[in-house]
Structures are given as structure tokens and as C-alpha cells.
Image (cartoon, coloured by chain):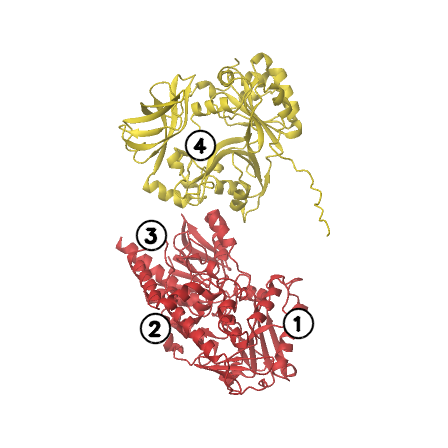
């Protein structure tokens, strides 16, 4: 009897991948608290969530955003393709500007959100959470553009906080003082800086080819020491994201490409993104469905809630007059800066649209093995809870 | 606005749609790229005066409704033409002849499978008639259908139930099955068994073992499954459609290719011709395939999902056409002139069909081509000594491409095969015309040279044809419609896609007027 030998298997990498900044992050991560972000080792927190949160709000912090998906869309038809993709009018953007945008499927439901970097009319970058390569190729089919997935080639650092401008100045990024929010500026060593971020505060995002990532980190930390520069993890950033009123796909709404149930998709109008839909720019993906959706009105509404008490309303149900179920909370926190109990909730029409008062959330608390529930009054408020003038001041103050 | 409606493409479907709209009082312009209308129902005229149907050489019995709605009977298409007989050539010389209900060997001897075959054909024909109402209307809507449609569907279901317990169970069993198993359950493989297989796969790119081929067969078996050639040949068909259109007040402009469909504010407003002329209209009907229509309008006018679905329609054709001019009428050994006056098939069995199909998968030419042959001169002396052969399972994407020598190879394979049944035929060839799927694509615009503008198989039929969302003939751009073979119920010379599209347009107008 012959013995069948198994062919020698070449080793494949298993587990999460390090980002280009990993060698710096790892020793600083005293808690060794890591999470999976798009297949990368991403810090959940370094020391304590609280100290990192307050660092974002009071000094300067970096968050490694290298796991974000980055796509380059370049070619003669790049502008046409970008306008075909997103609901905003990219033709209205000036060169070297960033626009936050969303894109929809044929039913007008949001697929994902992200930032559109317009370098020129023939050269764009799309930065987002979910893989979009095949969708971009669908949208671009028949047009003269090249789509390159730069996700593994470009590293990103989100430099956020009141002293972030001071850090950049100290690091010799001359000219950064004239950058307005959403401006892009190119610097030496392949570093591209955009005045963007998701903390609702003064901040920048720095984009750099992988091989220049280490040098950038060392340079920033050498200059940032006296400005309190420190790395932060996902948990602290998540708190500031909610305070800033920014929605997270997969949490506050479901990407229509992931939703198996046909009723789980949400239109931009239902997410409060109606202002990003430009019907006047000609056809774009989902336009016809969105025109119809605008006419019939939203089926749901994402709202910001200000809730009585100080118990965060995680996963709470929202009731009208304490009886009729009106929706559920998608993100919640006690905001240490606003000193308010805040949440986003997905309400089913007419709640949040025609009916906006008499709302309560049912908060569950595990008190040492005993569950208690209580109804807390909630008011619909502008979901941009943390809005501070220094976010947009140009030139920013040199704290 | 110069016209109420512009129809792109003057094939029989475009003409049918135009005629119905003109009869409803619209001003209609048909723009045809070729020198004359007809599309895939053209005629090849040889140097010696003989002629032959260029592509389609028979029609599936046209529906009575279409004939009367279009007024075709006044122009030579009465619907009362005698169906073609069928001759099945066998390698062992025991050819089979079918004429009306009779099934026997060509020499008159009884065929052992005659009873089994007849029972199967009759049963499938009964099934086909139950499904026939589906063909003559837009496909059922899965949501948002009005009550008339729902009543119609209920009637259809009731009709199937009325087949009786045994038959309705059998109907459900075979509906999505393959023709190979369905036929061979009843009889041994033979040229007779191959007949139903050929009816299922002819013109397409499926083997008889492909699931869903029974449904394709059922669509062709309705109205008894008869093939018809009207008096005067296929030219009569083109002329009848064109004359009926003209009589209804349709303007037909030939040699006028369309380079763009114009839109304004998401609405079709006209077309631009090759000469750069812009003609305005209230709506555009395109008898071209969806992808060409989308390209003419601009891909950017359509959602990416629509474009993706249309991109993925299977449109590679697998049927070529060989037309021969002969010095004398061919004489098939052991066959009378009358027996050779209808369809002549060369398939030796369902197994032969399936094996021949294999070559297509790999972009190869079949060793022994399978043909459906018609001798137009046998029925109409004016056509002269000519032979028209649809050669099944000839790949669109031939390895090495369709060079002149490849075409010559196909021609000699066809002649070799014919020579075996009709000795001396090769020597009598005066002129030969080989139209590969690529030629058919170039000449008629049919994508992939596929005469259905897209495989006619279960997953591309009914509300899935041409793609979900365009199945009701309406394109997403308002005022834009499809009316060609790519739409339900598909190709073959029926005029149904065109009629259905026009009826859908008129229904929409009525609805709008009521609102």
C-alpha cells in the first residue's frame, strides 16, 4: 500500500497584522489591550480610557488609523466616477479639499460613509471603513479611471486635540497655520496632511507611505513631548466620536451591503444626511430611489438624545409616553466634557419626525447580579453634542 | 417634439412595437441602421439569382392575437400556413419523417418509439399551452402588480391544477428539469429523441442536459410547436411586418444608425443619428440589447447595479448560419422530395447533442456539426436551388478567432456532413456563405451573435429577462423602453417582445392620463 504524503504546506500568516506603527504602539500599550480592526492589531486602550479621553479633549493625541481603507481613483473620468459614486457634488469641491460623504445603492440605502480627498479633478482618494474595491469597480465600469487599493501602502495617523496644531508647528510643518478645516496640504517626505478627524475638535490626519511611517512617528513624538502628545486607543476615540455627533456604520446604521434583511437599509434622509444629497448634479447611484424616498418621507430617523440621569443608555429601548416602543439606542455614553447623558437612537416614524416629545429610554443596570430597569426621560437634541469654535478657527490657537 | 415615439432598430420586433403605437394614434419613426428593415429576418441573394433566408429560416407559429393586432394577414401572413414537416436524418439510413401527427420511418415503416414520442410531445404541448398566456403578456410582477395581473396568474395556476393530479404533478416535476432526462425517461436515444432536444437548445448555448431546458422547450412548443414558412419565404415575413407598419402610418428610415439616445432631466427626449441629426421625441423604444442601449444613453445614467446585471447577461451565441447556392437541388438518399421540403435535422440523438455541445465550452468547432436545414426552393421554386443551414454549437469565441480559414474549415465540416446524406452535394456548390456568431453580431447587432440577445434559459426568462428591474420593458430612465429579443419572451420570430413592449407603453400612458 502506498502512503500518500501530504505536500509540505508553506506557512501562511495567521492572526492579526501589525500596522506600520506597531513597533511604537506595542511598548506603549501597557495594558496589552488590542482589538481587531479590519484585520489589524489596533489598540483598544494604552493605559486607561479616561486618561486617553481627557488627553484628546485637553492636549494632543495620535490614533493609528492605518487600518482605514484607502482607494485611489485616478484618470480622465475620475471626477465623473466620484460624482457617480457619492451623493454630494464633488465638482463643487476645490482641489486639495476633503469632503465627508456617503454613497448609496440602487434603493437609496447608504452603503458606507467616508472622506473624499480631491487632489485634482483627475485624482481622488476615498477613505472609508468597509472594503469597497469591488463596489468602486462596479461604479467605475465603462469609465476611464484606474482604481488602486492603497489600504496596505498608506499609513495614517489621526492627530487630534487642542494642542495638535502646536505639535505640527513644533514639528516644522510650515504653512499648516493657513489650513482651514477640510484642507489638504502636501509636505516633505511624502506626508500629506488633511485638517480632518472624528473628535469634533481641532485636529489633523497625517497620511504617509508605509516606509516613511516610522520616521513620521519619531519626528512627531520628538516635537510633541512638551505639548502632551500621547497615543490613544479605540475606546477613547469612540467616546469623542459620539460627542462629535458622528455615526458609525455597523453600529448606528447597517451598511446596505451587509444587511441581509431588505428592510435594514437606511436612506441618507433617515440618518440626517439629507444635506449631503445633491439632486441637481445629474444622475448618481441611487438618485431615482432617493427622489422617491424624499417624496414618501423617512421611515426612520436617527436622533441625538439628551437623557435624564447619569446612567448611559446602552442598547436601551426608546418608548413614547413610556408605553409604545419607538426605537432603540445605537450609541450611548455619559459625556465627561458635556456633563450630559447622551445617545443616538434609531426611531421608527413618526417618532423622531412628527412625534418628538414624551420620549423615554428604558435603561438596564446589572447591580451585582440583579438586573434593574428604569425609565429615564429623553429629549431630542442636535446630535452634534460637542461643538467648539476652536475646531474651525484659522489659524488655530497655539495652546 | 418631432415624433411621439422613436423606435431604434427595424427588426420585426421594432416594427411590431411601432405598428401598435402608430395604431394607437402616435406618430412613430423607426430608425434602421441597415439598408432595409428586417434585422435577423433578412434575405441573401446569390449571383445566379437564387436566394435564401439570411438568418432565421422559419418562424414559430405567430400568435393569432399578434397577427390581428398588427394587421399582418393583409400583408401575406395569415397564420393559416401549413406547418413544416420534419425529416430526421440518421447515419444508418433509417431516416424518420414527421408530418402533422404522423411519426414513421421515411420509408413508411413504423417507428418503435412513435407512440411514446407522440404521448410525450402531446403532454409537453399541453403544458406549453398552459404557460402560453405568460408569453403574450409582460412577465408577472413579484410586487406591486395590479389585480388584473393577479387574477391572470391565479387563472394560470388554476389551469395547471386542472391538468389533473397526475399531469400537474408531472408538470411541476419537469418544469425546471433538463430535456435530456425528460425525453430519455420515455424512449431510447435516437434521432427522434433528439428532435425535442434540438427544439429546446437551437440558437442557444446550452446542452440538452442543462437544467431549465424543458422550460425553454415548453416556450417553443406552444401553439403546437409548429414551424412556419409563409408563401414567398421569409421575405414575406419582413415585408408583412414592414408593410403593416407603413400602413399604420409608421415612418421607416433605413441606413440611419443611432449614435446616442438623448436625455434631459432623467427623461429620454430624442436620438442623435450617425449624420449628427438630432430628432426629438416623447419616448424611445430600443430593440437593441440592453447593454448597447445603455451605452447609447450613457452608462452614467444608470445605477451601477443595473449596469452590473446587464453586463452579466449571458449573450454568447453558439449558432452559425451556412447558406449555399447549388447547381441542382440536393437529393438526400432514401428521402422523397416532399419529405425534404420542411425542416431537416442531422442530430443523431440527445447524447450526440450533448457531446457536440462540449466543444463550445472550450471554444472549439464541433467535429460533426449539428444542423437544422431548410431547402427554400422545395416550397418556393423562385428561391432556386439553395440550402439554408443553422449550424448549432459553433462558438462565438472560437480559439484563434474567426479567420477566413476558420470559416473555410466550418464550411468544409458542414459540407462533409451533408455529403454523407446527399452524395454529390459538395460538387454542386456554386457559392457558400458562412455567417459565424461574430458575423451575426456585426451585422444585426445581436450581442454575442446570440439570436435571442441573451440565453433563453430559466434564470434569464420571465421577470428575470433581460434583468430584474427592466423586465417590464421600461428602463430606469423615464420614457425609455426595450422592445427587442432581449426582453420577455425572447427571440425567435414571434413579434411578441415588440408587441408586449408597445402594450406596456400604452398601458402606462393610460394610467398617467387617468391620474
Q: Residue at x 47, y 37 (%)?
A: A112
Q: Does dot 1 land on a helix, a strand or a loop?
A: helix
User: What number is the disc on residue B217?
Assistant: none
Separation of marks 3 and 4 at Cα, in angstroms? 32 Å
Q: Nearer the viewer, mark 3 or mark 1?
A: 3
Chain for colour yellow: A
Q: Would residue B60 be visible to someone looking at this image?
A: no
Label 4 CA crowd tier, 10 Å (few <14, some 14–19, many 20+): few
List x then y, in percent, for residue A136. 53, 42
Q: Which comes sooner in the sequence, label 2 or label 3?
A: 2
Separation of marks 2 and 4 at Cα, in angstroms? 61 Å
The one of A8 and B121 positioned closer to us in this rendering = A8
Label 2 CA crowd tier, 10 Å (few <14, some 14–19, many 20+): some
Label 1 CA crowd tier, 10 Å (few <14, some 14–19, many 20+): some
Left or right: A71 in relation to B157: right
Q: Nearer the viewer, mark 2 or mark 3?
A: 3
**In this picture, is B174 found above or below A56?**
below
Amino acid at each position: 500500500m502506498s502512503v500518500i504524503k501530504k505536500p509540505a504546506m508553506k506557512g501562511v500568516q495567521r492572526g492579526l497584522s501589525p500596522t506600520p506603527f506597531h513597533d511604537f504602539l506595542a511598548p506603549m500599550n501597557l495594558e496589552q489591550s488590542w482589538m481587531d480592526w479590519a484585520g489589524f492589531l489596533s489598540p483598544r486602550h494604552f493605559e486607561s480610557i479616561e486618561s486617553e479621553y481627557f488627553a484628546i479633549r485637553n492636549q494632543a493625541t495620535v490614533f493609528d488609523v492605518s487600518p482605514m481603507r484607502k482607494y485611489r481613483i485616478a484618470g480622465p473620468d475620475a471626477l465623473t466616477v466620484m460624482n457617480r459614486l457619492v451623493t454630494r457634488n464633488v465638482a463643487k469641491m476645490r482641489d486639495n479639499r476633503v469632503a465627508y460623504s456617503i454613497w448609496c445603492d440602487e434603493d437609496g440605502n447608504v452603503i458606507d460613509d467616508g472622506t473624499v480627498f480631491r487632489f485634482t479633478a483627475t485624482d481622488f482618494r476615498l477613505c472609508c471603513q468597509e472594503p469597497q474595491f469591488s463596489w468602486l469597480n462596479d461604479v467605475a465600469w465603462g469609465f476611464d479611471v484606474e482604481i488602486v487599493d492603497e489600504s496596505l501602502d498608506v499609513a495614517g495617523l489621526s492627530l487630534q486635540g487642542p494642542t495638535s496644531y502646536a505639535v505640527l508647528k513644533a514639528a516644522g510643518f510650515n504653512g499648516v497655520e493657513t489650513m482651514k478645516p477640510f484642507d489638504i496640504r502636501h509636505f516633505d517626505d511624502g506626508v500629506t496632511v488633511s485638517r480632518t478627524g472624528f473628535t469634533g475638535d481641532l485636529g489633523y490626519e497625517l497620511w504617509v507611505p508605509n516606509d516613511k511611517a516610522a520616521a513620521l512617528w519619531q519626528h512627531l513624538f520628538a516635537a510633541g513631548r512638551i505639548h502632551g502628545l500621547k497615543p490613544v486607543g479605540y475606546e477613547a476615540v469612540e467616546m469623542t466620536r459620539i460627542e462629535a455627533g458622528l455615526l458609525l456604520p455597523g453600529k448606528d446604521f447597517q451598511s446596505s451591503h451587509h444587511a441581509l434583511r431588505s428592510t435594514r437599509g437606511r436612506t441618507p434622509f433617515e440618518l440626517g444626511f439629507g444635506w449631503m444629497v445633491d439632486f441637481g448634479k445629474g444622475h448618481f447611484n441611487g438618485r431615482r430611489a432617493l427622489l422617491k424616498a424624499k417624496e414618501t418621507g423617512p421611515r426612520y430617523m436617527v436622533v441625538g438624545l439628551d437623557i435624564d440621569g447619569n446612567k448611559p443608555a446602552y442598547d436601551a429601548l426608546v418608548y413614547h409616553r413610556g408605553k409604545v416602543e419607538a426605537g432603540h439606542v445605537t450609541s450611548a455614553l455619559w459625556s465627561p466634557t458635556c456633563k450630559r447623558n447622551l445617545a443616538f437612537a434609531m426611531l421608527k416614524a413618526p417618532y423622531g419626525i412628527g412625534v418628538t416629545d414624551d420620549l423615554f429610554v428604558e435603561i438596564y443596570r446589572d447591580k451585582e447580579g440583579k438586573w434593574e430597569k428604569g425609565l429615564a426621560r429623553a429629549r431630542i437634541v442636535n446630535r452634534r453634542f460637542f461643538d467648539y469654535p476652536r475646531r474651525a478657527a484659522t489659524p488655530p490657537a497655539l495652546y | 417634439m418631432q415624433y411621439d415615439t422613436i423606435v431604434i432598430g427595424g427588426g420585426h420586433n421594432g416594427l411590431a412595437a411601432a405598428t401598435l403605437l402608430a395604431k394607437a394614434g402616435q406618430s412613430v419613426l423607426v430608425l434602421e441602421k441597415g439598408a432595409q428593415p428586417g434585422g435577423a429576418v433578412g434575405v441573401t441573394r446569390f449571383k445566379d439569382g437564387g436566394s435564401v433566408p439570411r438568418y432565421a429560416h422559419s418562424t414559430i407559429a405567430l400568435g393569432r392575437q399578434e397577427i390581428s393586432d398588427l394587421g399582418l394577414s393583409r400583408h401575406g401572413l395569415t397564420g393559416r400556413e401549413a406547418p413544416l414537416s420534419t425529416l430526421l436524418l440518421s447515419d444508418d439510413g433509417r431516416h424518420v419523417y414527421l408530418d402533422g401527427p404522423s411519426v414513421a420511418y421515411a420509408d413508411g415503416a413504423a417507428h418503435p418509439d412513435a407512440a411514446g414520442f407522440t404521448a410525450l410531445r402531446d403532454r409537453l404541448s399541453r403544458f406549453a399551452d398552459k404557460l402560453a398566456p405568460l408569453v403574450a403578456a409582460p412577465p408577472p410582477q413579484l410586487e406591486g402588480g395590479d389585480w388584473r395581473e393577479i387574477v391572470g396568474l391565479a387563472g394560470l395556476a388554476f389551469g395547471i391544477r386542472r391538468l389533473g393530479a397526475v399531469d400537474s404533478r408531472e408538470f411541476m416535476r419537469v418544469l425546471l428539469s433538463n430535456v435530456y432526462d425528460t425525453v430519455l425517461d420515455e424512449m431510447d436515444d435516437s434521432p427522434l429523441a433528439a428532435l425535442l432536444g434540438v427544439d429546446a437548445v437551437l440558437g442557444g448555448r446550452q446542452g440538452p442536459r442543462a437544467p431549465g431546458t424543458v422550460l425553454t422547450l415548453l416556450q417553443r412548443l406552444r401553439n403546437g410547436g409548429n414551424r412556419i414558412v409563409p408563401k414567398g419565404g421569409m421575405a414575406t415575413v419582413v415585408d408583412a411586418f414592414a408593410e403593416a407598419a407603413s400602413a399604420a402610418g409608421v415612418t421607416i428610415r433605413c441606413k440611419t444608425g443611432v449614435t446616442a439616445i438623448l436625455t434631459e432631466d432623467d427623461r429620454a427626449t430624442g436620438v442623435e443619428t450617425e449624420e449628427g441629426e438630432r430628432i426629438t421625441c416623447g419616448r424611445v423604444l430600443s430593440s437593441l440589447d440592453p447593454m448597447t442601449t445603455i451605452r447609447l444613453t450613457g452608462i452614467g445614467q444608470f445605477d451601477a447595479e443595473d449596469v452590473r446585471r446587464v453586463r452579466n447577461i449571458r449573450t454568447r451565441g453558439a449558432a452559425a448560419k451556412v447558406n449555399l447556392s447549388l447547381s441542382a437541388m440536393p437529393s438526400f438518399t432514401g428521402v422523397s422530395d416532399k419529405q425534404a421540403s420542411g425542416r431537416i435535422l442531422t442530430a443523431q440523438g440527445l447524447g450526440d447533442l450533448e457531446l457536440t455541445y462540449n466543444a463550445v465550452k472550450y471554444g472549439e468547432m464541433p467535429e460533426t456539426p449539428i444542423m437544422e436545414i431548410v431547402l427554400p426552393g422545395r416550397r418556393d421554386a423562385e428561391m432556386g436551388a439553395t440550402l439554408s443551414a443553422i449550424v448549432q454549437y459553433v462558438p462565438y469565441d472560437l480559439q484563434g478567432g474567426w479567420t477566413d480559414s476558420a470559416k473555410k474549415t466550418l464550411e468544409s465540416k458542414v459540407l462533409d456532413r451533408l455529403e454523407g446524406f446527399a452524395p454529390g452535394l459538395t460538387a454542386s456548390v456554386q457559392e457558400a456563405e458562412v455567417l459565424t456568431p461574430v458575423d451575426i453580431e456585426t451585422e444585426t447587432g445581436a450581442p454575442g451573435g446570440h439570436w435571442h440577445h441573451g440565453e433563453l434559459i430559466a434564470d434569464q426568462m420571465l421577470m428575470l429577462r433581460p434583468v430584474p428591474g427592466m423586465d417590464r420593458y421600461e428602463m430606469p430612465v423615464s420614457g425609455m423602453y426595450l422592445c427587442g429579443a432581449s426582453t420577455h419572451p425572447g427571440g425567435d420570430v414571434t413579434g411578441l417582445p415588440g408587441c408586449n413592449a408597445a402594450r406596456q407603453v400604452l398601458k402606462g400612458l393610460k394610467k398617467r392620463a387617468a391620474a
